[in-house]
Amino acid sequence: MTSDETRIAYTLRLADNALVLAQRMVEMVAAEPELEEELANANFALDYIGQARMLYTHAGQLEGKGRSEDDFAFVRDEHEFRNLLLLEQPNGHFGDALVRQFLFETWYLHLLDGLIACSERGLSEIAARAIKEVKYHSRHSSQWLVRLGDGTELSHERVQASLDDAWRYTGEMFAADEIDVAFQREFDGPDLAAIHKLWRRDVEKTVAEATLRLPDDDWMLSGGKQGRHSEHLGFLLAEMQYLQRSFPGATW
Amino acid sequence: MTKQEWPLYEVFIRTKAGLSHRHAGSVHAPDDQMALSNARDTYTRRSEGVSLWVVRSDRIVASDPAETSAFFEPAEDKIYRHPTFYDIPDGVENL
Amino acid sequence: MYTQGLDQGGRDQQAAVETAEQLAAFQKRIDAEEKIEAKDWMPEAYRRTLVRQISQHAHSEIIGMQPEGNWLTRAPSLKRKAILLAKVQDEAGHGLYLYSAAETLGVSRDQMVADLLSGKAKYSSIFNYPTLSWADIGAIGWLVDGAAIMNQIPLCRCSYGPYARAMVRVCKEESFHQRQGFDIMLNLCRGTDRQKAMAQDALNRWWWPSLMMFGPNDSESTHSAQSMAWKIKRFSNDELRQKFVDVTVQQAAFLGISVPDDDLKLDEASGHYNYGEIDWQEFIDVIAGNGPCNQQRLDKRRRAHDDGDWVREAAQAYANKQAARVAA
């Protein structure tokens, strides 16, 4: 793998994470528990769409074959997407979606922090912008986890189950494969083992404050980063890509 | 438990440093922290502010419209409080 | 996005405690273009008219998120997805501003939402039509927001201060809504034959419902005269509708698609377009709950509300616990 291939692959993973999560959040529009939460969810989804656009554009520039943000988003197949499995899981109820957001963003925040310091200029600049957005999201999702965990008996039970269910997808965030290793080595990229410790510390703290129980590190699912997805991604893409597929080459 | 509506908060925004906070509208929220978040997500989507205040609407003490005349009209005849009350002869400057 | 001539309903009765002097003094303030504020004395009928109109307007914004939200997951480019999401979010925000304005009149958001979910409160008939293609998103922005703006700009000068202020914010934020709709239509009309056909089909389906948004003809509009006198309303339904037709017909010509009305004709003398008869029976049917999507829209709103119950309660329970901990 050349170092250009490494940074393109690494950038596309980040872009796919942002887009797939945004798509899931967009599905929640007009179904939030309160009007104020509609505004928040849409703000955060807009942030992720913006990040995906910057990242795809950056990947296209590095690649130099003239692929646009929309080419990456709308005409790649399922196995070409490299997002985390966690992010493509169906929304479930508010607590499920919130836990997904909390677990991912606690990780993503540290990852972005690492990326700001990396030597890949484009990614470093995008990360510097994105981290401001994600800091705010993370504050929001942490606070909500505490409210649900320490709210009513019902909410406590529900969000504990959400946490237990989502846990099996968290291992993938820290399982460094050859792309992670190469990016760290060649571009002074984030150290996933170090991030794992920070993530664990932050998650433990909020989970304790929420009076919830940290699930055991049992079997962890992985494969998203390598393009081996759950069944859910295919439907997400079929819906998202339908117009571009049905009108090849059209402009909108 | 009985269902409660989330309390109402009034939102004040400072649009840029140097200006005072100004009433923008209101939001519902279960607690102060979330009121602040909700105010941010509702009222600053177009870079409208650099600082936010939120306050529970039921904590605001307001004057009563029925007492408007007693409260505010007595100030109306104190015209000597305004600089325009005074005639300054031509030729006097910087006053 | 919108308010409409939905203000039918029984005539309000004057409460016995309102004296002729009070009413005359109130009207004098209105005539002097003074703004009425939340705690000021006001006739009960004025208050009720406002609560009805503002809450209907808010409900319309909230239900109005659905037809456009229907295409969020399928928007054809990332740019379009972001723009549409920003627009749908604005609608949530506008609903929120408007509920807040109505709350100043002493009615709670919970009560207004309950009235919407029970079917007691109305919302704009336009949102009971389905969005069947991407061009419908263009047509909604161009026509529905275009009609809405005609209705809403005069409301920025409405006599009730909190409503007028909310509308100033709404109108300012909405200025991009109509343009992005026209921009979608323009791209389709300059695109492939299939895209242009999609645009024409959308205009065919949305034209007449858009004209209905201005409400019944002036001769049929029960509350118009009183609302005009109170300066809640500043132009009549027919005046606004005519203005809309005049500007929109020219925009359709620019796009190269045709307005589905054989009677449409420029009247050289007046400079206005004459247009065909609106199918008022359809309007009445949709308002009565029998439009293509009434059931679906309300069901979705009820489901979201019910699904959110445990979340709202949990947040409140947590806040109560925290308050108790601080007190202890």
Image (tube, coloured by chain):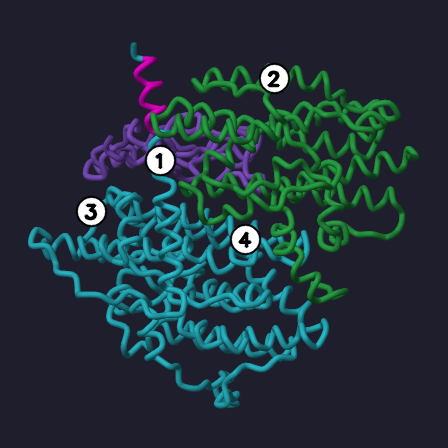
Chain colours: A green, B purple, C cyan
Residue positioned 44% across, 25% down in the render: B33
Q: Mark 4 falls on what kind of element?
A: helix
Q: Quadrant of the C terminus of chain C?
A: top left
Read off the residue under disc 4: C87
The mark nearer the N terminus, 1 or 3, is: 3
Q: Does C301 appear above or below A87? A: below
Residues beneath discs 4 and 3 located on the same chain: yes
Residue C250 x/y as whole percent: 59, 78
Q: Between A37 and B35, which is closer to the camera in this rendering?
A: A37
The mark nearer the N terminus, 1 or 4, is: 4
Q: Mark 1 falls on what kind of element?
A: helix
Q: Quadrant of the N terminus of chain C?
A: bottom left
Residue A200 badge:
2
Quarter of the image where one finds residue A56: top right
Residue positioned 27% across, 34% down in the render: B4
Label 4 environment density (alpha carbons within 10 Å; few <14, some 14–19, many ≥20): many
Q: Which span is picked out in magenta?
A: C316-326
Read off the residue under disc 3: C41
